[in-house]
Image (cartoon, rainbow, N blue to C red):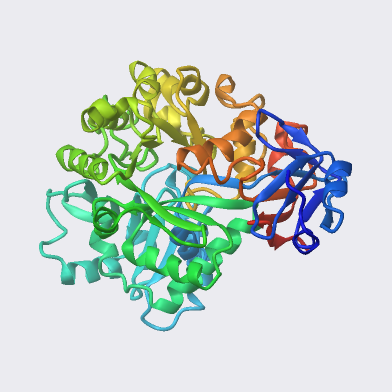
Amino acid sequence: MLACTGVVQAQVKVVTGARVHTLDPARPLVEAMAWDEHGRILTIGDASDLLARYPGAKSIDATGKTVIPGLIDAHGHVMGLGYALMRADLVDAADKAEVIARLRAFEMSLPPGAWLLGGGWDQNDWPGKAFPTAEDLDEAFPDRPVWLERVDGHAGWGNSAALRAVAAKASRPLDGDWQPEGGRIERVAGKPTGVFIDAAMSLVNDIVPAPDAAYRRQALEKATQAAVRHGLTGVHDMGVSREDLALMRQFADEGRLPLRIDAYADGDSGALADLCSAGLYRHAGGRLQMRGVKLYADGALGSRGAALLEDYSDDPGNRGLLVTEPAALEAAMRKARGCHVQVATHAIGDRGNRLVLDAYTRALGDAAKTDHRWRIEHAQVVAPAEFPRFAALGVIASMQPTHATSDMPWAQDRLGPTRIKGAYAWQRLQASGAKLALGSDFPVESVDPRRGLHAAVTRQDGHDAPAGGWMPDQRLSAAEALRGFTADAAWAAHDEAEVGKLAPGLRADFVILDEDPLAVPGEQLDALHVRSTWVDGKPVYEAK
């Protein structure tokens, strides 16, 4: 290590008195870390050695605390989180009556005539578990259009006023037996019930008034602040439009991005065209980049839109939906490969996962043996024969631990006792040689990564149920879970030379916790206390 001048030493910072889990196998546990004025780690080691080496450095005393690398969510939706924080919150509503009550309270803040927007409902949590209808909303909201996204974002529920607004602008009547490609309009006797699944949601989304610039800026601000408050220093943002990337670029230019965003283009759209014409994007400040594209194969399990090889166990005759026509999906993969763009594809059902693995095999060709790091997002239900194909193709399984604990009350109803063994199968995939990256899919799930660590290690919900965990043989160790949210997530986005570990030369992105996540019981991981979150060696969140 070269000696520092007095001027530079005064700009060096050293965190001391802590357990520092570096996630670097060469030196996994130290007690101090020093970084320079640019936010690059200079060295790690014993506190006495570092303070002697940098006598003029500013010392941050973390006695009794634990330092870990900054947590990275490998699958989130930043603008979606911002919008969710600005609409009616229906998460964990116990029934339709509670939904109505929350909507009535939220409506008080709206001007006359404005759409009432909300999200987070889940019919699986309600008595009967049946999809709701427009009539359920009509008595409370006879005139104001209401549009409510399901918790997974793969279905929407509107009232009759919303249906009338759609009908007034639709190119064909909503009645009948026709279905939009990649989606489904729920109907009874040929009449729409008010629920639209996957691509059918665009019939409503396209007529909801678009948010203005001020609203969008507020959404991005709320989302990024929520992320760093929970210890996130990075997010892989899945499905970013050209317009949203431009907004994020404005924030980065203004120094208002408190964390790193790895943006993935929203399918075969304008953002991917920009990557192909102008090259992969990276902001000079190092906190924003777009080098990948997010594609969709199928829908979601909760709304029975995930594409299955056999019928849903609780809905004979239904095998789910392919959101993107297979030829178009493979064409987008080939286009991305030609532009040197990393591909991440949403696949939840076993048919969806098989389809993506088959398409990757053809699209990659000889490049399957290169360091391409293509990904399957969710990899939620996988047929036994497909497990070895992930490692053979070099495909990353990007998975979300809280999906398992949210879905466990009804997942076996959908899949039956045999198929469920290939669902949420973290250890089976890992044992087959596949690399995992962990995230949350916020706002579908909470943005709080501590809940993901808890779910990964315990396979239990927030009330520590069921005892012993659901399908406990698929639990991850605390070290595996932490790695999934740090070093492995960084690797999945080609960021391992910058973040994911605490080692000389890497960025000083870290979190200071009151507790040691590798020492506390798994049931306590969702109660870890975040004292501060640091990006580029500067605090972006400090607890009061």
Q: Nearer the viewer, residue 371 or 317?
A: 371
Where does the C terminus fall, quadrant-wise? Answer: bottom right
- Residue 460 appears in the figure: no
Where does the N terminus fall, quadrant-wise? Answer: top right
In the rendered image of this protein, does residue 428 appear above or below residue 320?
Answer: above
Q: Nearer the viewer, residue 143 or 184?
A: 184
**In-image side of 172 versus 61 (left or right):** left
Indicate the position of residue 21 as horizontal and vertical percent values. 72, 37
Indicate the position of residue 531 as horizontal and vertical percent values. 76, 54
**Looking at the image, which residue is at 48% across and 62% down?**
284
**Looking at the image, which residue is at 61% across and 46% down?**
506
**In-image side of 383 versus 4 (left or right):** left
In the rendered image of this protein, does residue 65 appear above or below residue 240?
Answer: above
Indicate the position of residue 13 as horizontal and vertical percent values. 77, 56
In the rendered image of this protein, does residue 399 appear above or below residue 59?
Answer: above
**Looking at the image, which residue is at 47% across and 58% down?**
288
Q: How many marks?
A: 0
Q: Nearer the viewer, residue 381 or 296?
A: 296
Q: Residue furthest bottom?
A: 112
**In-image side of 70 versus 237 (left or right):** right
Q: Nearer the viewer, residue 223 or 333?
A: 333
- Residue 368 appears in the figure: yes
Q: Quadrant of residue 226?
A: bottom right
**Looking at the image, which residue is at 64% across and 33% down?**
465
Indicate the position of residue 147 as horizontal and vertical percent values. 36, 64
